[in-house]
């Protein structure tokens, strides 16, 4: 009778463990919890070709964080595409930008941003975005 209960108890415990481990790993991959990295794309939605990325880096109190190196990597959801990689320029306190990030194809993109500070702290942000075909003509 006791052995029949064992699988019933073990299964939820295993699921719980898996969830906890997954959550911990997710935290680590996001980087420093005291940093907030965000990006806006102009225009929205972006079209094939150059788009402007407006990036902000703040602490959790909303104070701008300066001096970061911010690298943006764009990948499409399908295999076989060369990633688009660019580095943001500082534009003001806590404000960074890329004036001509090149979306090379229409479709579903994932932007992965990583900001690294001189003291070694870093934070990562992942933004899915849809890129539309060039306005006013077929590609
Ligand atoms: Cu593609």
Image (cartoon, rainbow, N blue to C red):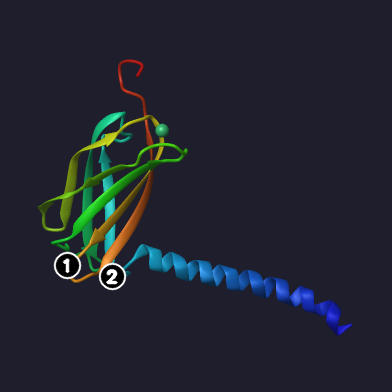
Q: Secondary structure at mark 2?
A: loop
Dot 1: few (<14), some (14–19), or many (≥20) neighbours within 10 Å?
few
Please identify, in this view, whether the residue under mark 1 or under mark 2 is nearer the observer: 1
Q: Quadrant of the C terminus?
A: top left
> Residue at (19%, 57%) from the top-left corner?
69
**Which image quadrant is residue 67 in?**
bottom left
Q: Nearer the viewer, residue 98 or 40?
A: 98
Q: Nearer the viewer, residue 37 or 71?
A: 71
Instruction: State the image coordinates of residue 35 (x, y, percent, origin top left).
Output: 27, 66
> Residue at (21%, 46%) from the top-left corner?
54
Ligand 1 lies in which image quarter?
top left
Dot 2: few (<14), some (14–19), or many (≥20) neighbours within 10 Å?
few
Above or below, 16 against 135 in this view is: below
Asked whether the beta carbons under mark 1 and mark 2 sit within 8 Å of each other, the answer is: no
> Residue at (37%, 29%) from the top-left corner?
132
Instruction: State the image coordinates of residue 125 (x, y, percent, origin top left).
Output: 34, 55
**Which image quadrant is residue 128 in?**
top left
Above or below, 134 against 35 in this view is: above
Please name the residue that numbered disc 2 is placed on.
34
Above or below, 49 against 69 in this view is: above
Q: Which of the numbered marks, if any, corresponds to residue 118?
A: 1
**Which image quadrant is residue 49 in?**
top left
Query: Distance of mark 1 from mark 2, alpha carbons?
Result: 15 Å
Q: Residue furthest bottom?
A: 2
Does label 1 or label 2 sit earlier along the sequence? 2
């Amino acid at each position: 009778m006791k052995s029949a209960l064992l699988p019933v108890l073990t299964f939820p415990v295993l699921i719980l463990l898996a969830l906890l481990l997954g959550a911990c790993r997710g935290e680590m991959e996001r980087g420093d919890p005291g940093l907030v990295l965000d990006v806006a794309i102009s225009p929205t939605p972006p079209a094939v070709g150059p788009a402007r990325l407006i990036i902000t880096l703040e602490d959790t109190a909303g104070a701008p964080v300066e001096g970061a190196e911010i690298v943006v990597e764009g990948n499409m959801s399908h295999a076989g595409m060369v990633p688009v990689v660019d580095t943001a320029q500082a534009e003001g306190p806590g404000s960074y930008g890329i004036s001509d990030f090149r979306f090379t194809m229409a479709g579903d993109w994932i932007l992965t941003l990583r900001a690294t500070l001189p003291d070694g702290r870093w934070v990562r942000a992942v933004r899915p975005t849809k890129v539309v075909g060039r306005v006013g003509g077929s590609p």
